[in-house]
Amino acid sequence: MRLDELGQGETAEITEVLGNDVLASRLMEMGIIDGEPITMIGKAPMGDPIEFSVQGYRISLRKTEAARVQIARTE
């Protein structure tokens, strides 16, 4: 499952950041790393960007950026 498919208030575990480019590195520098829990806080009125909570802080990602992050739902 991709991070951009996560529903509001849902939490998942990051399993992989796809790619080996500048964007993948930037996501990892922002705390998007394997094994970290991440929660979807909400979306902008038009659905882009999406706000997430990870490692105790909030980040906003574009849908295309969030689509590069693979996750596994946690209950």
Image: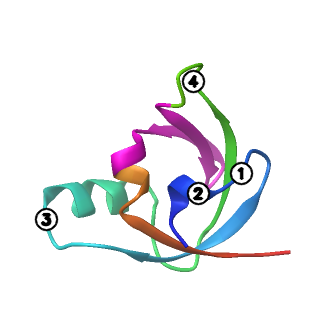
Check whether the beta carbons of the residues at disc 3 and disc 1 lie within 8 A of each other: no
Of circles 3 and 1, which is in front?
1
At x 74%, y 61%, the residue is: 11
Calculate the distance from the C-alpha at mark 4 to the C-alpha at mark 1: 13 Å
Q: How many residues crowd mark 2 within 10 Å: few (<14), some (14–19), many (20+)?
A: few
Of circles 3 and 4, which is in front?
4
Q: Which residue is mark 2?
A: 5
Q: How many residues crowd mark 4 within 10 Å: few (<14), some (14–19), many (20+)?
A: few
72 vs 38, nearest the viewer: 72
Image location (x, y in percent) of residue 75: 86, 75
Q: Which residue is mark 3?
A: 21
Of circles 3 and 2, which is in front?
2
At x 27%, y 54%, the residue is: 26
Check whether the beta carbons of the residues at disc 1 and disc 2 lie within 8 A of each other: no
- Quarter of image, res 72: bottom right
Q: Earlier in the sequence, mark 2 or mark 4?
A: 2
- Quarter of image, res 74: bottom right
